Image: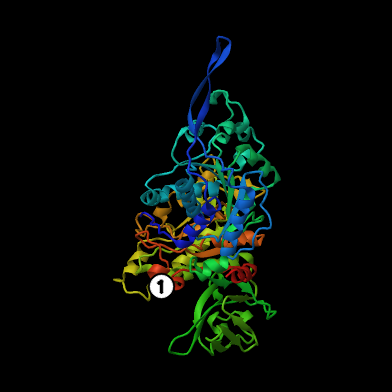
Amino acid sequence: MKLKYKHQKFQADAAKAVVDVFKDQPYSTPSYMVDQGRNAPALFNGVENYDYSTGWSNAKISQDLTDKLILERIRKIQRDGLIKPSEKLAERSNGYNLSIEMETGVGKTYTYIKTMYELNKAYGWSKFIIVVPSIAIREGVYKSFQSTQDHFAEEYGKKIRFFIYNSSQLSEIDHFASDSSINVMIINSQAFNATGKDARRIYMELDEFRSRRPIDVIASTNPILIIDEPQSVEGKKTKEKLKEFHPLMTLRYSATHKDPYNMIYRLDAIEAYNQRLVKKIAVKGISESGTTATTSYVYLESVNVSKKNPTATLQFDVKLKNGTKPKSLIINEGDNLYDYSNGLEEYKEGFVVTKIDGRDNHVEFLNGLSLYAGEVVGKVDEDQLRRIQIRETILTHLEREQELFYKGIKVLSLFFIDEVDHYRIYNEAGEPENGKFADMFEEEYDSAVHSLRLQLDDNDEYAKYLDAISAESTHSGYFSIDKKGRLTNGKINKKEGISEDTSAYDLIMKNKELLLDRDPKKSPVRFIFSHSALREGWDNPNVFQICTLKQSSSDIRKRQEVGRGLRLCVNENGERMDANVLGDDVQNVNLLTVIASESYDSFAKGLQ
């Protein structure tokens, strides 16, 4: 599959806003002499022997474009976009500073790539540096350049040359300076803002770089800086370090700006939802009810409404030969859980169903207990709550999958967990085994699919699809990998709380199209387990369920996690299923369900 991209007005408007600030800037592609460094250790006639070659830089902003005129342009753009006008220009320490707000999932990276093309087309500017806060975002940006390359080449007749900064591959910097086409360097902030020896190499005179400092060669191009997620990049120290790049201007792109310097375009969460550019959010909150002091375990999975009287799917403990085990059964009004539990004493007092109400999805018992769908009472521990969340995610997944199967849309679900050991453990021989969440998943998946298959004809194409995928093959963990090849929590950036290991991203980010393939033989994975590695920087358009088997510490992190599933989905041909294709049905198809704890439940509802 190859993802297909469309020209969208809001992305063009965001690019135009940047271009319009510099209206009347002359088109220019100035050349200069690039210092190629010392080519021999010996002196020639007492003078060190240096080489020079032709380089290309961004033309400086015309002297006719005064600060007063630039501010007037910015204010006009802001008024036209219903943005509060700036009282004054933001600081000029890193060139002109402009901010663009774009909600997660609408194509922020696509937008700033388009902006590069438009700035090049209008003014000849061709040197850009994208600064990102983490390896996750860096890899996602690189993948976006790869997948959009042909799309933009069709529109502009040229391709961007892009690369990731690597202090051991310094020839790329020479190419960046000497190539006359549009050139983009992608760099994570740790590469120039950390304290390690490798991070400082960008400021060192290096023998392998012919006694030059990489930062000097980069700065000589007068680049335009693009900061992706500035709230995660820019501290006081980073702002000072960015001056070393001698930027022509700095453009900031984020959904959650901390310091919105000269905001010239805004597509916030409300507007993105109103324009039907992101998925609608539904929430399944799993919580313990405090309505009774009973120690009896009862979980109301759902109220089932049909032409007949409503029924309830309840999970409760059942006595077996070797102890007790929770089971899910369909219950009618008048049924007694004591009987169905094979006589467990804990259900003896009044656990007779007296009312099943399909209007608000609640059930009442003779003893006064009242439960709403998703509520649990009784002796329930943390693992039981997590099992319920996993089950609800699987049930929701299968429901959505069956609905979208005949539309040619693959459905994915994403689990956020706190520890790799909960998903994968290793025995004494070093062989991988399931952690508790993986075991829970396979047990609940087999149970859910078995129940669904009883309702499907064997000749049904969706039934054949389910039969072709086993519980073991349809889930996978995406984490960092240690030197022994084992899954690990990985190296975590404590300040940002995110993984800094590239091994976590290979399949899920670099092979995004494979993950979207519906052929069970090629890509049986539909359920993804990960933790901080996928909190930001990774988006797959076909994530329809997000389950948080952990507690998130802040609303920003919760928003980042929900953001992993906000993109509009694509079909098996890579075509985006937006309002142009689906019309008013766009947010019925594009529905993201968050299966969460109570605190996350209230957050997700508030976000929508």
Instruction: Report the side of 395 relative to 324 (left or right).
Output: left
Residue 477 appears in the figure: no
The location of residue 225, given as percent across then percent down, is 57, 45
Q: Which of 7/535 is in front?
A: 7
Residue 208 location, quadrant = top right
Task: Looking at this view, name the residue that lies furthest to the top.
Answer: 45
Q: Residue at x 62, y 72 (%)?
A: 287
Q: Position of residue 15 (x, y in %)?
A: 50, 55
Few, some or many C-alpha atoms within 10 Å of disc 1 (few <14, some 14-19, many ≥20)?
few
Quarter of the picture containing the N terminus is bottom left
User: Position of 570 compared to 380: left or right?
Assistant: left
Residue 76 lies, in percent from the top left, at: 58, 60
Q: Quadrant of the C terminus?
A: bottom right
* Quarter of the rendering containing residue 582: bottom left
Picture quarter containing residue 44?
Answer: top right
At label 1, the amino acid type is Gly
Near-viewer residue (302 or 471): 302
Residue that carries the numbered disc 1 in the rendered image = 583
Q: Name the one closer to the observer, 287 or 325.
A: 287
The image position of residue 443, as x and y in percent, is 48, 64
Badge 1 marks a residue whose secondary structure is helix
Residue shown at 63% from the left, 65% from the top: 382
Decide: is 178 above or below 101.
Answer: above
Between 384 and 499, the residue placed more toward the observer is: 499
